Image: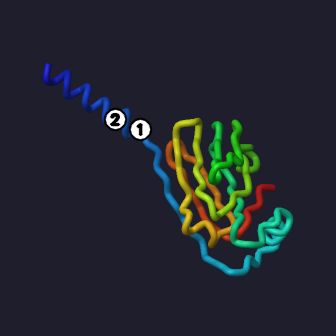
Amino acid sequence: MKVFNKIIICFSFAVISCSAIKTTEIYGTEMEVVDNVRSKVMIKKFHAQNKNKSFLDFTSQFDNLITVKNGDSIVLNEKSKTLPMLGYTNSCVIFNNKEVEIIIDKKHKMKLNKEQLPKYKFIYIEKDKNHYKIEYTNKARSFM
């Protein structure tokens, strides 16, 4: 009976550790002026010149319901799948002076670093199974 209990406990730990999500945050160089042409065009087009707005982009390995809460508002809530040829999934504009929470499939929750958001214009989220990489940068990526 003790051996059976040990097997159940070990199996439980294995299941719990497999389902836990992990996040890694990467911070790029902080710049007062964004000097990349692609970045300047996006900032101008979406009226994001001040530090209150940033672009949140979901890049690779997604086939999930993605919900983005920005303060009390939901700015994105849709099933999104990565376009394999582009490595791009979905994006939205967020306000940096409000809390940003990302919910994947209504169960995995992540919060963006509110202190770091005003320093960066572009936040990229990449998924690899249960590991999410959040990259804060001031350079727009090309998806074409």
Kind of residue indicated by mark 2: Ala
Residue at 37%, 40% in the rendered image: 17
Regarding mark 2 in the picture, which secondary structure is present there? helix
Residue at 74%, 43% in the rendered image: 83
- Seen in the image, is 41 located left or right of residue 117? right
Residues tagged 1 and 2 counted as in contact (Cβ below 8 A): yes
Residue at 54%, 54% in the rendered image: 111
Q: Quadrant of the C terminus?
A: bottom right
Kindly give the residue lying farthest to the left in the view shown. 2
Where 26 falls versus 19 (above or below)? Answer: below
Q: Local crowd at mark 2 within 10 Å, few (<14), some, or many (≥20)?
A: few
Residue 138: percent from left, percent from top: 68, 71
Where 95 falls versus 76 (above or below)? Answer: below
Marks 1 and 2 sit apart, C-alpha to C-alpha, by 6 Å
Residue at 68%, 60% in the rendered image: 95
Kind of residue indicated by mark 1: Cys
Kindly give the residue lying farthest to the top in the view shown. 1
Res 113 → quadrant: bottom right
Q: Local crowd at mark 1 within 10 Å, few (<14), some, or many (≥20)?
A: few
Where 109 falls versus 26 (above or below)? Answer: above
Q: Which residue is mark 2?
A: 14
Q: Which residue is mark 1?
A: 18
- Seen in the image, is 135 located left or right of residue 3? right
Residue 61: percent from left, percent from top: 63, 44
Residue 104: percent from left, percent from top: 58, 41
Residue 2: percent from left, percent from top: 13, 23
Q: Nearer the viewer, residue 62 or 103?
A: 103
Q: Any mark on residue 76, and which?
A: none
Regarding mark 1 in the picture, which secondary structure is present there? helix
- Seen in the image, is 140 located left or right of residue 72? right
